[in-house]
Image (cartoon, helix red, strand yellow):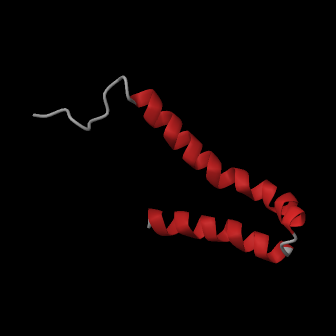
Amino acid sequence: MSTEGSATPARLPLLALACGMTAANLYYAQPLAGPISMAIGLPTGAAGLIVTGSDQDKADFLS
């Protein structure tokens, strides 16, 4: 039985960090959408669609 590519105890903290950063990336965009859209002149509705699109991608992946 090969252990190549498996989650060894040394890799688990790195995997946990990667998972946490990925989840945080999805949620940090929500409160920042308004200020970013104002800074670049994007309509508020379009900024909301960007966050919605991210959530929809996440839902498609999970189903």
Q: Quadrant of residue 43?
A: bottom right
Residue 27 shown left or right of residue 45 in the figure: left
How many marks the image carries: the answer is: 0
In this orientation, which residue lies closer to the viewer: 3 or 39? 39
Q: Give me the residue at 56% from left, 47% from top.
A: 22
- Relative vertical location of residue 17 with respect to residue 35 in this rendering, above or below: above
Residue 21 shown left or right of residue 14 in the figure: right
Q: Give me the residue at 63% from left, 71% from top.
A: 53
- Quadrant of the image containing the N terminus: top left
Task: From the top left corner, tell me how far across and down residue 39 is, in percent.
Answer: 88, 62
Q: Give me the residue at 63% from left, 46% from top.
A: 24
Q: Residue furthest front?
A: 40
Q: Give me the residue at 61% from left, 65% from top.
A: 55
- Relative vertical location of residue 49 with respect to residue 9 in this rendering, above or below: below
Q: Quadrant of residue 36?
A: bottom right
Q: Residue furthest left?
A: 1
- Relative vertical location of residue 6 with respect to residue 44 in this rendering, above or below: above
- Quadrant of the image containing the C terminus: bottom left
In this orientation, which residue lies closer to the viewer: 58 or 43? 43
Residue 52 shown left or right of residue 18 in the figure: right
Residue 53 shown left or right of residue 1 in the figure: right
Task: From the top left corner, tell me how far across and down residue 26 is, in percent.
Answer: 63, 54
Q: Quadrant of residue 6?
A: top left
Task: From the top left corner, tell me how far across and down residue 13 is, in percent.
Answer: 46, 28
